[in-house]
Amino acid sequence: MSMIGNRVIRKEDPDFLTVGGKYVADVGPADALHVTFVRSLMAHAEILEIDTADAREMPGVVGVFTAADLGLEARSPGMPMLNQDMKRTWLASDRVRFVGEPIVAVVSETRAQGVDAAEMVFVDYEPLDAVIDLEESFRDEVLLFPEAGTNLAWKQPSPGAEGIFDDCDVVVDLEMRNPRMSVAPMEVRSAVSHWAPNEEGRMRLTQWACTQFPHRTKEELASGMGVETDDVHVITPDVGGGFGGKNGAYPEDMVTAAVARAVDRPVRWTETRSESMLALAHARSLVYWLKMGGTRDGRVTAYQMSLIQDGGAYANIGCVLPMFTRIMGLGVYDIERFDFESNSVVTNTSPIGAYRGAGRPEATTPLERLLDIYAVEIGMDPAEVRRVNFISSDAFPIKTQTGADMDSGEYEKALDAVIEAADYHGLRAEQARRREDPTANLLGLGWSTYVEVTNPMSASEFGSIEIKTDGSAVVLTGSSSHGQGHHTAFAQLAADVTGIPFDKIEVRHGDTDEVARGGGTGGSRSLQVGGSAVVEASEMVIDQARNVAADLLEASPADIALDTDAGVFTVTGSPSITKSWAEIASHLEARGDLLHAETDFQPPAATFPFGAHLSVVEVDRDTGQVTPIRHISCDDAGTIVNPLIFDGQVHGGVASGIAHTLMEEFVYDEDGNPLTGNFMDYAFTSAAEVPSFERIAMETPTDRNPLGAKGIGEAGTIGAGPAVHNAVVDAVSHLGVRHIEMPTTPQRVWRAMNPD
């Protein structure tokens, strides 16, 4: 019986729910020293002096390090398309550019001693004007990097938009913002560094890392420390949430390794929640200028998007996310003419990184919002406007004008499934009834139909399987789990192919000495490439075992079959004569060999999951409070290996999209001081604010991997956010409200309802 499609309970959960996980803060040498960072209190300033003398004399202090003490040099952005003059030193030396930027590293025997000593470090600043507003930054009146001569980190110019709206019967436009948010994972960042001589006597770094990408982190540490990659060993234990924020190594990870080498002792660092809110990558933060035109019967023929992307204080991955925004700019719609322009700028704020969807929600949010405005303008139901403009299912595979090489899609089918499941027409009737009843909460219905690109860079992934002499198996994967359920799903795949019982398959990852290579986890790629690698390796080890069984059974390999139900190899026509996995592995071990196979699965291209979301919200007439009461979604990610895990990924994504739309916003004052630097001030959603969602199953397989699977980790966020946003505006649209900025807080909604 196949394991694919079964709601197998996650094998990771018993430990998490009983003894708990084992995170970086829980591991490493017991005698490790502690690093405490002195961070900038100013958003933009020249550093005139750093006085560490008093801190060095504090009890328990082993060392106090500035950039000069460690010999750190300013480095250009790692991505070559970014402005290479926007350099950063891991510890700020001449200028600080955001509140929370690390300046000094204090190394002490205990954490408490480090905190006390850090208070004794004196930094003399010469304040500079701070640039927070994106449009102000774009004007280059105050420069973060005078040597660069501009605040522009990267640009995608418009190909030319002249005349694209000339034949349109109706044209609508909108300026809107996508607010900055904190990634805010459950586990804050942590690192432990330990240098010790290897067998040849060279010093080798072992780094316990809180990261989604162990092998990438290994390469970054090797480069940063000036050693060979073989002289770095990265171990990633349990990771309590990543969402893109734990993408490779941060300056603090590098400095921890550098000071461990300087003091010749193991060193550990774990940030506080406040530090995490300031120095872990932030997300989103854009302003858009949008324009859409077409016919009065709902056909959209032209769409224009111009945006400014906030990169934060230092140009990094956040600045290049508009590349994905452009690729996915047209969504699920067949729109003839598209014009796109993006400008990524730096500001005196925390650097922007990748967060759940990374460039794809930034495309869907404005498109779906403007499509609703277009529907209102022509007097057509927003669901029908979407239907009119869908790319038809028989058009696939298709390469769009933005370069999206899309595999498969059933957009109208997903929309119709949600309409039926939600009783959409009944909800519209209820909405009309409530508008006539002054005592009833207003009802809003919001649509979002989306497509996203997963594994957008078509990355490969490593997988291996080794069969033990007791018939059990060990699967190694280059993917890195931080809550997704890899151990369960990958064990299901190996069990399905080999016939080895699910409970006898162990999945391991995250140790770069044990796992030869790997891509890590991000871009919703784990199952489609990591899982496919496990399947390929499992098929390869079956071929090896078949040859051994043929020798043992004195038959031709072509006559050897694997009975996956029984987990044994048989001779065709003689099913009573068998050899088990354990017997074959034991035979090889006696010869000094292993029953083992490994592979790197390379997909031909990315995959494109899609779906339709309908949000139903209530709005309190007196306060503007928005309460989501239903969320119905059809998220199609191809073949589903484990529906339970699939549901969990969608539910988490839906919660994220709802939270970003209704409450999450990281706010700075005009001087660059963070106003939402902890969970007392930053509106962070809980289960109490999020409804259970209603998922409609649909599977449109892809031909780009042997599983037929697409990614699902980010889909819920991409679909849910715009649906909720549209629902909020829809609830009050009869009052003449055209748009409400995100987050749609009660204050903003009330003011929109009461403009006078």
Image (cartoon, rainbow, N blue to C red):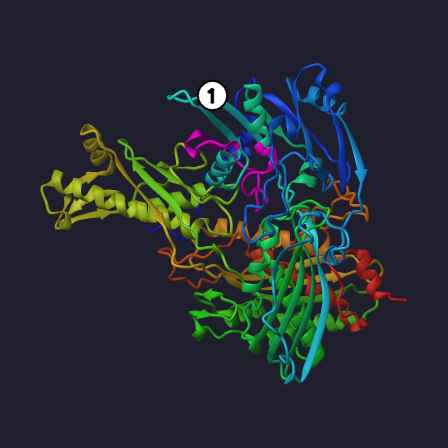
Magenta region includes residue 238: yes
Indicate whether 157 appears above or below 337. Answer: above
Main SS, magenta region, reads loop
Estimate the x, y position of residue 717 in percent, counting from the top left: 60, 55
User: Residue at 81% of width from left, 71% of height from top?
Assistant: 735
Magenta stretch bounds? 225-254
Question: Residue 12: x, y in percent?
Answer: 48, 38
On the picture, is 321 further left or further right than 104? left
Task: Residue 166 in the image: state x and y as whole percent.
Answer: 65, 83
Which of the 4 quarters of the picture holds residue 19?
top right
Q: Quadrant of the C terminus?
A: bottom right
Q: Which residue is mark 1?
A: 196
Residue 691 on the magenta segment: no
Describe the element under mark 1 as helix, strand or loop: strand
Q: Amino acid at mark 1?
A: Ala
Judge from the rendering whether residue 176 lies leftward or rightward of residue 188; answer left or right.
Answer: right
Which residue is outermost to the left? Answer: 554
Where does the image place residue 718, in percent across and percent down from the top left?
Answer: 59, 58
Q: Residue at x 70, y 73 (%)?
A: 373
Residue 298 makes an appearance in the image: yes
Name the residue at 46% across, 66% down. Answer: 406
Q: Residues within 10 Å of mark 1 (few under 14, many from 20)?
A: some
**Residue 416 versus residue 233 in the image, above or below:** below
Q: Which image quarter: residue 251?
A: top right
